[in-house]
Amino acid sequence: MVVAVRASPLVFLPSSPFAASRNLKKQCSNTIISLNIGLQSSSSKPSCITISSIKCSASSTSAIVSKDEEPLPLEVNEIKTMCKTWVWRGYNINYLSYQGRNNDTSHPSLLLVHGFGASVAHWRRNIATLAQNYRVYAIDLLGFGASDKPEGFAYNMESWAQLILDFVNEVIQRPTVLVGNSVGSLACVIAAADPSQTSIQGLVLLNCAGGMNNKAIVDDWRIKLLSPLLWLVDFLLNQKSIASAIFNRVKQRENLKNILLSVYGNKESVDEDLVDIIRTPADAEGALDAFVSIVTGPPGPNPVQLIPKMTLPILVLWGDQDPFTPIDGPVGRYFSSLPSQKPNVSLFLLEGVGHCPHDDRPDLVHEKLLPWLSNLPVADNVVT
């Protein structure tokens, strides 16, 4: 069955100038064109439909697509235009609120929390897909993305966790599932572990970090071997001129791309947009201070100490090619052991995937995430 794009439930925010190009990649002219549309089946095996001999004029906005086609990633510029500002303790926090056509209030909202150096746009390949059935929020943590990077702020995991809780209570105001990557996962764990919170309905952890930095991981031989070097790096980063030189070198486009290639399993996902997503905020005022504070600061609470007390549903997705938090490291081994110890925890190992599964292989993440979300119990609609 085929439907016109204009009438399709896959069209989100029809007022957006990017909607047509996002939902159907096409070249529009006064000639006959041919479209190849890649589909994902329920088994995640790709298939292809070829649609040929379609007349498309420059003024036309209709086209033919499969009803089951997964929405294409959001454009980075589209994300920027849709973002809003929330003021938290005097600081401007950048966030996105995105709703598809299905406004089922029985479903919890989703809050996406990025990892180190990333931002809202790092979820570009997930937002539209998740928004088919859920209200989706994504946030730039303080010090990252388009959020403020205050001078002299001492960054710590507890502050980020409190920011998340306050955002859920003040902005979302509904039961919420937290979805985090890397250090964002850990911030979500700390937030959900707060005994006073009643709003978080579940956790999705994508390659969860063991701390704000590697100082949290003390029983890994790799970290022990590098400990003298890590302390030297801390010392050097506390020298402003040296820190600036290191930071400027790291954020050079080619160097940054090479770093991203080293942590992604699917190298095709490392495109120029991804480099810009990481690089652009690094040029903002306060980015250097945030970088130094986070790398040299206290690691914060450890998930090993927090998760045993939790009873809410937890989904753990782990890329097996992660060089930062490898599955055979202490943090990875701990999460691997959880399903046999805690019935509320489900874990899936994603083969050939790196540190950022949601952007590396979004299809594999959606394949596990969407059924898990659909099986969550229905909760009250209002946070108390």
Image: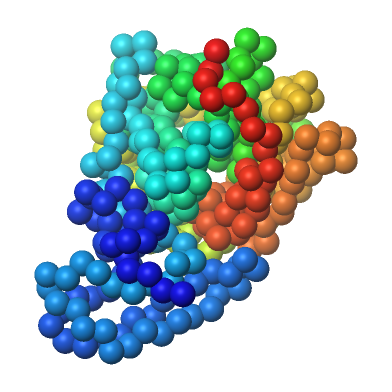
The one of 299 and 173 positioned closer to us in this rendering:
173
Q: What colour scheme governs how the chains and residues are painted in the rendered image of this protein?
A: rainbow
- Please give left or right for residue 313 compared with residue 212 in the image: right
| Residue drawn at the location 55% of the way across and 29% of the way down | 176
* Tally of numbered discs: 0
In the rendered image, is residue 68 in sight? yes
Q: Position of residue 372 (x, y in %)?
A: 67, 46
Residue 68 lies left or right of residue 289; in this view the side is right
Give the farthest residue toward the right.
340
Question: Where's residue 298, x and y in %?
Answer: 57, 20
Quadrant (top left/top right/bottom left/bottom right) for the C terminus: top right
Q: Is residue 246 visible?
A: no
Q: Nearer the viewer, residue 148 or 123?
A: 123
Q: In the displayed structure, would residue 204 be above or below residue 165?
A: below
Q: Is residue 276 left or right of residue 340?
A: left
The residue located at (52%, 20%) in the rendering is 382
Image coords of residue 141 (percent x, y): 42, 28
- Viewer-proximal residue, 350 or 78? 78
- Residue 286's image quarter? top left
What is the x, y in percent for residue 234? 50, 27
Residue at position x 61%, y 17% in the image: 198
